[in-house]
Image (cartoon, helix red, strand yellow):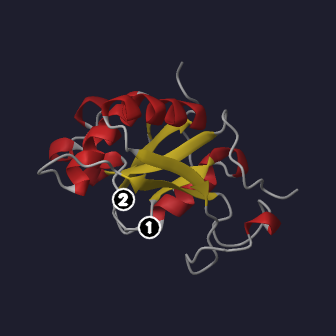
């Protein structure tokens, strides 16, 4: 079965969190720095995983390849993202953002022919990105300060899952679910 290009509204999306996403490096839900979670650090999108086409173990394996100290994940449904974008447009009418399916090959390059990707493909077949098309900056504001506001609001719609055993190679915590 091929992974669909269109991301379903009920799909759970996963963002990895690392020690540096927490204030004073204290790992607790209260110390998470919500303004930093959904910032575009690579200039090409905010990396996510499509949980439906992945697993907790695969997500952890992908996260541990990143040269940062993995701590856990933050999860949300696509419908919650879309409703927040719509809400946020009331504050910043020019704001535009979307989530796009963006599978990666073995070298972390985007695969252009996305219609022929299966869950079993090598690389990262379940990768997606949040794309900030127009951050709708206001006067004297930087791109990052505009996006921090959106990131904080999105974080409130998410469920934070701290991995009880981040050093282990497999995931032994609770299944990824979005609180309602």
Q: Position of residue 134 (x, y in %)?
A: 38, 53
Direction right: furthest residue: 1
Q: Is residue 38 above or below residue 46?
A: above
Q: Residue at x 30, y 36 (%)?
A: 152
Quarter in which the C terminus is drawn: top right
Q: Which residue is mark 2?
A: 40
Label number found at residue 2: none
Please indicate whether residue 163 sits to the left or right of residue 117 in the image.
Answer: left
Q: Are marks 1 and 2 in contact (CB under 8 Å)?
A: yes
**Could you say which is closer to the camera, residue 162 or residue 128?**
128
Quarter in which the N terminus is drawn: bottom right
Direction top: furthest residue: 180
Q: Residues within 10 Å of mark 2 (few under 14, many from 20)?
A: some
* Local secondary structure at mark 2: loop
Q: Position of residue 22 (x, y in %)?
A: 24, 44
Measured in 3D between alpha carbons, the distance from the residue under mark 1 to the one under mark 2, in whole angstroms, is: 7 Å
* Local secondary structure at mark 1: loop
Inspect this view and state whether residue 158 appears: no
Q: Which residue is mark 1?
A: 44
In this rendering, the count of numbered labels is 2
Q: Position of residue 150 (x, y in %)?
A: 33, 39
């Amino acid at each position: 079965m091929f992974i669909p290009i269109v991301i379903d509204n009920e799909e759970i999306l996963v963002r990895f969190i690392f020690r540096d996403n927490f204030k004073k490096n204290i790992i607790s839900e209260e110390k998470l720095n919500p303004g930093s979670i959904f910032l575009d650090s690579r200039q090409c999108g905010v990396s996510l995983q499509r949980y439906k086409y992945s697993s907790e173990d695969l997500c952890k394996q992908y996260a541990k390849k990143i040269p940062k100290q993995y701590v856990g994940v933050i999860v949300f449904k696509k419908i919650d993202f879309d409703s927040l974008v719509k809400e946020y447009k009331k504050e910043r009418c020019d704001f535009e953002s979307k989530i796009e399916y963006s599978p990666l090959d073995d070298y972390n390059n985007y695969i252009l022919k996305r219609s022929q990707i299966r869950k079993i493909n090598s690389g990262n077949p379940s990768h997606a990105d949040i794309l900030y098309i127009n951050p709708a900056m206001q006067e004297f504001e930087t791109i990052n300060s505009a996006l921090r506001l959106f990131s904080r609001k999105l974080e409130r719609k998410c469920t934070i899952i701290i991995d009880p055993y981040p050093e282990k190679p497999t995931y032994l915590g609770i299944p990824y679910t979005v609180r309602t």
